[in-house]
Image (tube, rainbow, N blue to C red):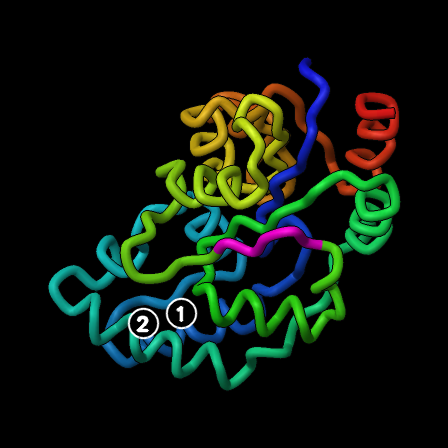
């Protein structure tokens, strides 16, 4: 393992339990289009695979469905909370002067609003979400943008995420993918490119203390 100069972090499912608005929005949209709803676990795994969920679920109606999804999502925008160990990890990175960036498939504006709501703005040198022209993970495009903002080569970063899309994007770019197992098994994450897997952020922090310091 190479010693990282910066850490890239997925948001939903990695640092933040932000699935309540996502589950609410997706199932409301599915119902509206006469499609079967998903269980909480199905939504979390679907989200973690990345790619364009609106295309795979709604086909030619994806643009209308995407707008409705966001309208439903924003009804519960702040129904989110930090995952265990997230605050301690971010404080540790910040106190040790290790740049951190959010790389999320959430829209740029919503990511910034939710990060501010959590009181985490100071912890991040960059927040990179989706906006016009940005490609969603597992495409490495947003990770590449984050590395440019940080002015750090991808090979000098770790990418920490809970989804296979995070691992694939990091591996494609040359960042070192670190998986958080939960919605996906360690085997699934490793198959997607993870070089290491941990069950939670507390163990990630313990390992980083050894890897970085």
Q: Which mark is residue 30?
A: 2
Instruction: List x then y, in percent, for residue 41.
Output: 53, 54
Judge whether residue 73 can be spotted in this image. yes
Instruction: List x then y, in percent, for residue 155.
Output: 55, 22
Q: Which quadrant, please, contains the C terminus?
A: top right
Q: In this figure, which residue is indicated by the disc labeled 1? A: 26
Magenta residues, as a range?
124-128
- 143, 183: nearer the viewer: 143
Q: Name the residue: 39% across, 83% down.
A: 71
Judge whether residue 187 can be spotted in this image. no
Which residue, as the protein is rendered here, is positioned at the far top? 1
Q: Which quadrant, please, contains the N terminus?
A: top right
Which residue, as the protein is rendered here, is positioned at the far bottom? 75
Please give left or right for residue 92 compared with residue 9 in the image.
right
Magenta segment: does it hold 125? yes
53 relative to 62, above or below:
above
Task: Identify the element where label 2 is drawn.
Answer: helix
Q: Name the residue: 59% across, 53% down.
A: 126
- 134, 88: nearer the viewer: 134
């Amino acid at each position: 393992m190479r010693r990282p100069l910066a850490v890239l972090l997925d948001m939903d499912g990695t640092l933040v339990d932000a699935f309540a608005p996502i589950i609410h929005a997706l199932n409301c949209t599915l119902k509206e289009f006469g499609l079967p709803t998903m269980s909480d676990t199905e939504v979390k795994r679907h989200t973690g695979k990345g790619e364009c969920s609106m295309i795979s679920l709604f086909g030619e109606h994806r643009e209308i469905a995407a707008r409705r999804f966001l309208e439903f999502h924003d009804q519960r925008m702040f129904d989110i909370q930090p995952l265990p160990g997230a605050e301690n990890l971010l404080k540790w990175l910040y106190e040790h002067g290790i740049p951190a960036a959010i790389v999320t498939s959430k829209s740029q504006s919503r990511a910034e609003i939710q990060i501010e709501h959590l009181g985490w703005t100071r912890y991040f040198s960059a927040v990179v979400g989706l906006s016009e022209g940005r490609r969603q993970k597992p495409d490495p495009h947003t990770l590449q943008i984050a590395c440019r903002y940080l002015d750090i080569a991808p090979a000098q970063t770790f990418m920490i995420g809970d989804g296979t899309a995070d691992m694939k994007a990091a591996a494609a770019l040359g960042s070192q993918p670190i998986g958080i197992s939960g919605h996906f098994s360690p085997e699934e994450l490793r198959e997607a490119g993870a070089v290491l897997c941990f069950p939670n952020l507390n163990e990630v922090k313990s390992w980083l203390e050894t890897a970085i310091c």
